[in-house]
Amino acid sequence: MTHAADELALEELEQQQIDSWAHDGAAFAATFTDDADLIDVMGGHFHGRAAITETMQEGFATFMAGTRMSPPTTRIVDFLTPAMAVVITSGNCIIRPGEQECRPEDLSIQTKVAVKQDGQWLFRTFQNTRINAKP
C-alpha cells in the first residue's frame, strides 16, 4: 500500500467515527485497537475498546444525543514507520441539535497515533483538545 492509499485509509477511519457519532458507541470504538487510550476534551481517560464503547454509548444516550461530528478542516499525516502514523486534525467540532456549523469555542484539535494491524489501520491513542483561539 502506498502512502497515498494509507492516507486514504486513515481518512476513511475518521469517516467511520463521523458516521457512527451520536448513535453507535461500538462502531465508534471499532476504530480503535483493543488496548487504545482515548483522552476526551474534558480530560477524561478511557483505556481499551470496551471502555471507549461504554463511555461513548453512554454519552450518545444522554448529553451527546442528537449531535453530529463535523469533519476536520485540516489534516496532517506523518508516517513514522510503514505501520505507524501520527495524525493531527483540527477545525472539527460536535454540532449541537438545531445548529448547522461549528461554533468557534467548540473547535478542536486532535492528535492520534494510528497503527496498522493485519493490513488494517486503527487508532491506538486519541487526544482531543479545544483550540485556543487567543493569540
Image: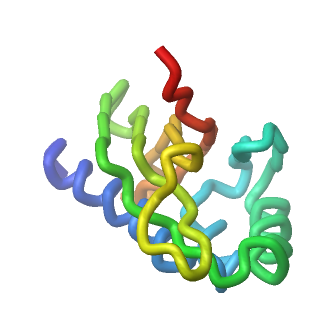
Task: Give percent across and percent down for residue 35.
Answer: 73, 49
Q: Is residue 120 visible?
A: yes
Task: Give percent across and percent down for residue 10.
Answer: 35, 54
Please give the name of the residue rendered at 25% of the width and 50% of the height, measured from the top-left corner.
6
Determine the image quadrant of residue 127. top right
Q: Is residue 112 visible?
A: no
Is residue 49 toward the left or the right of residue 93 in the image? right
Q: Is residue 74 above or below residue 86?
A: below
Is residue 19 toward the left or the right of residue 27 in the image? left
Number of numbered discs overlaid on the protein picture: 0
Q: Is residue 121 above or below residue 61?
A: above
Please give the name of the residue rendered at 57% of the width and 49% of the height, measured from the top-left corner.
106
Given residues 122 and 118, the one toward you in this image is 122
Task: Give percent across and percent down for residue 61.
Answer: 81, 83
Please give the name of the residue rendered at 25% of the width and 49% of the height, measured from the top-left corner.
7
Q: Is residue 134 above or below residue 111?
A: above
Task: Give percent across and percent down for residue 119.
Answer: 37, 58
Please give the name of the residue rendered at 18% of the width and 54% of the height, measured from the top-left corner.
5
Identify the coloring. Answer: rainbow
Q: For the view shown, which residue lies furthest in the top direction?
A: 135
Is residue 121 toward the left or the right of residue 94 in the image? left
Given residues 33 and 27, the one toward you in this image is 27
